[in-house]
Amino acid sequence: MADETSTVRPPLVELRDMHVAFGGVKAVDGVTVDLFPGEVVALVGGNGAGKTTLIKSLSGAHPADAGQILIEGQPVTIHTPRDAKSLGVETIYQTLALADNVDAPSNVFLGRELTTRWGNLDSSAMEDATRKLMARLNPKFENFIVPVQSLSGGQRQSVAIARAVHFNARVLIMDEPTAALGPAETEQVRELIRQLQREGLGIFLISHDIHDVFDLADRISVMLQGKLVGTVNKDDVTVDEVLAMIILGKRPGEVTIEDIAELH
Amino acid sequence: MTATTADSDAQAREARRRRITQIMVEGRAFVALIVIIIIFASLSPNFLATENLIIMTRQVAFNAIVATGMLLTILHGGIDLSVGSTVGLTGVIAGTFLEGYDVPLTELVAYPSVWVVIILSLAVGAFVGWLNGFVIARLNVAPFIATLGMLFAARGMALVISDGRTFTQLRGDPALGNTGFLTVAGGRLLNIPIPVLVMLVVAILASILLNRTPYGRWLYAIGGNPRAAELSGVPVQMVVTRAYVLSGLGAGLVGLLLTADLVAATPRAGQLYELNAIAAVVIGGAALSGGRGTVRGTLIGAFVIGFLVTGLVLVGVSVFWQQVITGVVIILAVALDQAQQKLMASGRLSGERKKQKDAGGTGSGDGVEVSAPAS
């Protein structure tokens, strides 16, 4: 799918030769990845592999030191989360970055509140829009006027996703979207991701959960110690081969039987 | 059949008991205020006299205005310890200008008109607040430390400017065109003291700001999760800085009102106001950790403290015991608040409230399903 698209048009997002250093530590060292519309690209790697740091340069949470970001072939600069959002790049953070003490509509519209022409909050418009959004994303969601701290993990994740997709997102970055969830809620969020994919969004998925990755991703980009080991099509590889890339940094062709044995 | 009836009866009783508990806990500051009024009204016939109520409310107004500004800083998770000193500083600024300001390097003495004095003094209050906000939001100094420093610095500036003396010539001189300060800030309108009217206006404006504007929503969100607010694109530094500017402005207002009330501007005015204001905010149900609190609660908190202290004076309790009792009330208020939070967290109250507000909602699936009949 990705290959067909690439012959017609440039990728939705391309991160070219990205570099990020913290002091002397090269957290991201010359990494290039891309993403097409309607595609899920999983970014995997051990702790400290640089996945989150790489993706923060796209979300605006921590700009890169060097490298180029292209959106639909056009070079862009992203310094703040606001920059990213204005380019249609939305991020859902690992720690469910919601304001716990306010309700779902307030969270969805946080920082981009709807106001009436008098400049005051248009609470009913925000609630209506949130209801419409949830009808599409998670029809079971009904708690629109309680602080989100009293919601379950899956419902909170729905709020976070609703916030991300409401403002015409084209690119969605999801950092461990199912890490804090139970099995039923995980399935709910996975279904949501497939739904967004069908709607044509490009999704960068960061996950430790190899089942998430194989279930959702079209392509898998593996990082190790700040470098890109390689990007593979999910259908061309086995779980063991991906694990070998994550742990040993060896591409599928380079892995020996001894290496595989060592993994188990 | 009978068993079911008894069951639902028990459930209804249980639900009613919970509702009453909930109302008592949530409205505890208001309940406390009513209790205070009833106790002192029965002990002292003068307590409910109109003139006494007006005087008490005027005293409450000073604290309530400061506390409303304090609430804004507490909502974002900060605090403003400098408000008492700002009250003193703005009073001194007003006093200096009303008595005549010796323009440096000249033989001139400036006598600005009363409105100019008022605006200049408020500007100084807002500037002190802005400095607090700058140090906190831009330089990332903890609010407690930054405003503690300002508590000393602003008080020191008040003493430096006044050279420690008290300004008493505030009446102005018709020949100089600077009369009227005492009327504007210390008079009455329709028999209501100006400070009380100012308190009402401040409370209404603050309520609108917090409940009806994006700014208010941002302040609550920052108090709840500052990182989330920032990642959502909320201009956190601006929001926080403005909270301190508004707090300084509130303190400046009180500096002017207090100066007019005392018919004297002293650099020592407003000492311990910060603590009374914090007490009012906390009794009013705000969380010092931020994200929770209302203007209405803060006003009630200010009334609780004010009426309690005046009531104790009226019934002849010694000043020493007054402080002990005030302290106990503050601690009780916060202890009750903690108990309420625990209760809410355990899902009992929140589950029930969700059902009421979100009729037909499925709840959060905590397994707590309370049937609450309408009656």
Image (cartoon, grey):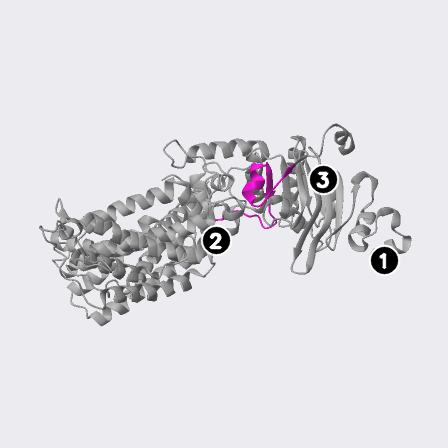
Report the residue at 83% width, 45% height from top. A238
Q: To which quarter of the image does residue A258 belong?
A: bottom right
Q: Is residue A89 left or right of residue A122?
A: right
Quadrant of the snapshot with the N terminus of chain A: top right
**Mark 2 falls within which chain?**
B
- Marks 3 and 2 sit apart, C-alpha to C-alpha, by 44 Å
Q: Secondary structure at mark 3?
A: strand
- Marks 2 and 1 sit apart, C-alpha to C-alpha, by 47 Å
Q: Which residues are magenta?
A: A75-101
- How far from the left and from the top, in percent, is residue B204? 29, 44
- How far from the left and from the top, in percent, is residue A27? 69, 55
Quadrant of the snapshot with the C terminus of chain A: bottom right
Q: Secondary structure at mark 2?
A: helix
Q: Which residue is mark 3?
A: A34
- How far from the left and from the top, in percent, is residue B254? 24, 55
Q: Residues within 10 Å of mark 1 (few under 14, many from 20)?
A: few
Question: Of the residues shown, which amino acid type is indicated by label 3?
Answer: Asp
Report the residue at 22% width, 49% height from top. B116
The residue most toward the top is A8
- Marks 3 and 1 sit apart, C-alpha to C-alpha, by 31 Å
Residue A262's tag is 1
Q: Which residue is mark 2?
A: B345
Nearer to us in this view, B364 or A259:
A259
Q: To which quarter of the image does residue A76 belong?
A: top right
Q: Nearer the viewer, mark 3 or mark 2?
A: 3
**Mark 3 falls within which chain?**
A
Q: Is residue B181 left or right of residue A220?
A: left
Question: Of the residues shown, which amino acid type is indicated by label 2?
Answer: Ala
